């Protein structure tokens, strides 16, 4: 019950007490000692977590579905021609994948993950086909010098070779948060960034891309599991060394300082390795933290939940 609700209950109870010799609880059908409870999207912060069933049996497996889609089209079209590897959270570079050669079907991946010991908190490493940066069939009107200079700077268009090869979509790592405990029936969305869209988006957002650095996109969720607006992300270990960005009305921007209704924001220019991202709500209260990997020229995706 809110504070205002409690005051209203007490006023009404006092007004009715002289009419009938009943307690406040009997008159209004509320507890005799109403307690204040938090409200709003962050009401669960610092509360004891609800007890949930945890899969601990050795060999337990869960089915996971991931739907890859095109970021530029706001996920209204599927991304296809992909392959993926399933990796443990601490397996940098996915040297020892749990599964390899996972192919998509119309952009959807379906695979099994182990759930013993508290769920699977690793990641899916997604890759795409390679084409020449000068190939208009693969990259449309941006194919040629502009795209080659941006995505394959060592390419010699006068004598094209393997150095001109560019991924159709930027490689991505999807970290599972919360950990997978049971079957995922509704596919998890993975918005892949088409390389053909890089010149326009980078130019519009004023982003400086370092091919030797990683890039993070995090979606904040509130206590109801809904995308959270007004959230700011920080990577304390790098401070101003990394550049924050947020999605604002469907546009990636460095000028915005917090999430919009999509809850999506992140960083570019993140040094490779493990990083810890903390989210803060509009009151400056830390809402949660997520640990992920950053890798050169790879987009890292995950969700940040209330602590």
Image (tube, rainbow, N blue to C red):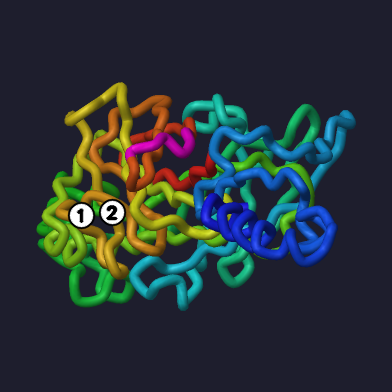
Can residue 150 be seen by looking at this rendering? no
Can residue 64 be seen by looking at this rendering? yes
Would you place residue 43 above or below residue 132 in this image? above
Residue at 67% across / 33% down in the picture? 48
Residue at 63% across / 54% down in the picture? 10
In the rendered structure, the answer to whether residue 293 lies left or right of residue 14 reads: left
Q: Position of residue 2 (x, y in %)?
A: 57, 53
Q: Which residue is mark 1?
A: 256
Query: Observer-nearest residue: 138 or 110?
Result: 110
The 10 Å Cα crowd at callout 2, few under 14, some 14 to 19, many 20 or more, is many
Which comes sooner in the sequence, label 2 or label 1?
A: 2
Q: Are marks 2 and 1 in contact (CB under 8 Å)?
A: yes
Q: Position of residue 164 (x, y in %)?
A: 24, 53
Q: Which residue is mark 2?
A: 246
How many discs mark residues in the rendered view? 2
Q: Quadrant of residue 107?
A: bottom right
Q: Quadrant of residue 297?
A: top left
Q: Which stretch did the figure color magenta?
A: 284-289
Q: Is residue 95 shown in magenta?
A: no
Which secondary structure dominates the residues rendered in magenta? strand
Would you place residue 156 above or below residue 122 in this image? below
Q: Which residue ends up furthest to the front in the rendered image?
A: 18
Q: Position of residue 147 (x, y in %)?
A: 18, 61
């Amino acid at each position: 019950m809110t504070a205002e609700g409690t005051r209203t209950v007490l006023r009404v109870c006092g007004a009715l007490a002289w009419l009938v010799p009943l307690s406040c609880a009997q008159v209004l059908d509320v507890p005799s000692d109403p307690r204040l409870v938090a409200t709003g999207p962050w009401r669960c912060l610092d509360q004891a977590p609800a007890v949930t069933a945890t899969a601990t049996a050795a060999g337990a497996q869960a089915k996971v579905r991931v739907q890859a889609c095109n970021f530029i089209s706001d996920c209204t079209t599927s991304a296809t021609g992909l392959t993926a590897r399933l990796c443990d959270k601490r397996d940098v570079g996915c040297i020892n994948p749990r599964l390899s050669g996972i192919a998509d079907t119309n952009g959807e991946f379906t695979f099994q993950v182990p759930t013993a010991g508290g769920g699977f908190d690793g990641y899916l490493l997604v890759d795409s086909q390679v084409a020449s940066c000068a190939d208009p069939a693969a990259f449309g009107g941006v194919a040629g010098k502009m795209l080659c200079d941006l995505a394959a700077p060592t390419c010699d268009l006068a004598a094209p070779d393997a150095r001109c090869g560019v991924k159709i979509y930027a490689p991505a790592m999807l970290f599972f948060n919360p950990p997978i405990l049971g079957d995922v029936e509704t596919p998890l969305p993975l918005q892949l960034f088409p390389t053909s869209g890089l010149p326009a988006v980078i130019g519009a957002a004023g982003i400086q891309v370092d091919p030797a650095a990683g890039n993070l996109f995090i979606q904040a969720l509130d206590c109801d599991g809904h995308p959270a607006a007004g959230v700011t992300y920080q990577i304390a270990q790098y401070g101003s060394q990394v550049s924050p960005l947020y999605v604002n009305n469907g546009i990636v921007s460095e000028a915005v300082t917090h999430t919009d209704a999509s809850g999506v924001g992140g960083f570019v220019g993140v040094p490779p390795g493990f990083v810890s991202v903390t989210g803060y709500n509009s009151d400056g209260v830390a809402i949660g933290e997520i640990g992920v990997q950053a890798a050169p020229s790879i987009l890292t995706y995950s969700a940040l939940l209330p602590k």
